[in-house]
Amino acid sequence: MPEKVKVSCPNCGATNNYPLGFSGKTVVCGRCKHPLPEPGSVLELSAGQASGFFQNSKLPILVDFFSQTCAPCHMMHPVVKGFAKRRAGEIMVVRINVDLYPQVAAEFRVQGVPTFVILHKGYERGRTSGALPEADFALWVASKI
Ligand SMILES: [Zn+2]
């Protein structure tokens, strides 16, 4: 049996079992047939996709609000990517570019970047701002989900 990892569909939020070993092939959502992201990837969503996903995902979500022009955001990006890979199947990771989607940042009252918000079933479970060492970051997320 191939190993399977849970992913939330970015289109409808349904939890899908994504078979590992399908790299390079397209796996689609069992409910809406939208292509699924590979487990462990960091999703870059538009404002419209993000609001639906935040409400519908059964898996918890870590949202990374970032800006291209912010140095601490660039420092945190490899930390967030590594975290997404290690916690594949347990939490979905989404990046929101606040310059492209200021309405999403405003909705979450994001004052500065980077800001990290943990959501589950549409509710905020925690948030932190600024760069963190990798171990502290992982501990902070683990304490919220
Ligand atoms: Zn779907």
Image (cartoon, rainbow, N blue to C red):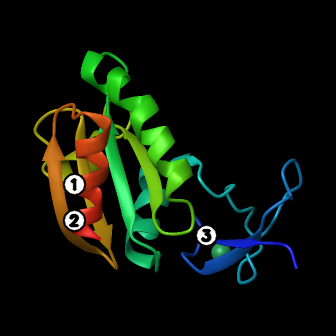
Q: CA distance from mark 3 to mark 2?
A: 25 Å
Residue 54, image x, y percentages: 39, 67
> Residue at image x 20%, y 55%?
107
Q: CA distance from mark 1 to mark 3?
A: 25 Å
- Residue matched to label 3: 9
Ligand 1 near label 3 (Cβ, under 8 Å)?
yes
**In this rendering, the label closer to the viewer, 1 or 3:** 1
- The secondary structure type at the circle numbered 1 is helix
Q: Is residue 33 left or right of residue 136?
A: right
Quarter of the figure with residue 11: bottom right
Q: Tell me, for residue 140, which label it has, or none.
A: 1
Mark toward the start of the polypeptide (1 vs 3):
3
- The secondary structure type at the circle numbered 2 is helix
Image quadrant holding the N terminus, namely: bottom right
Residue 28, image x, y percentages: 79, 68
Image quadrant holding the C terminus, namely: bottom left
- Residue 32 or residue 59, whichever sits in front: 59
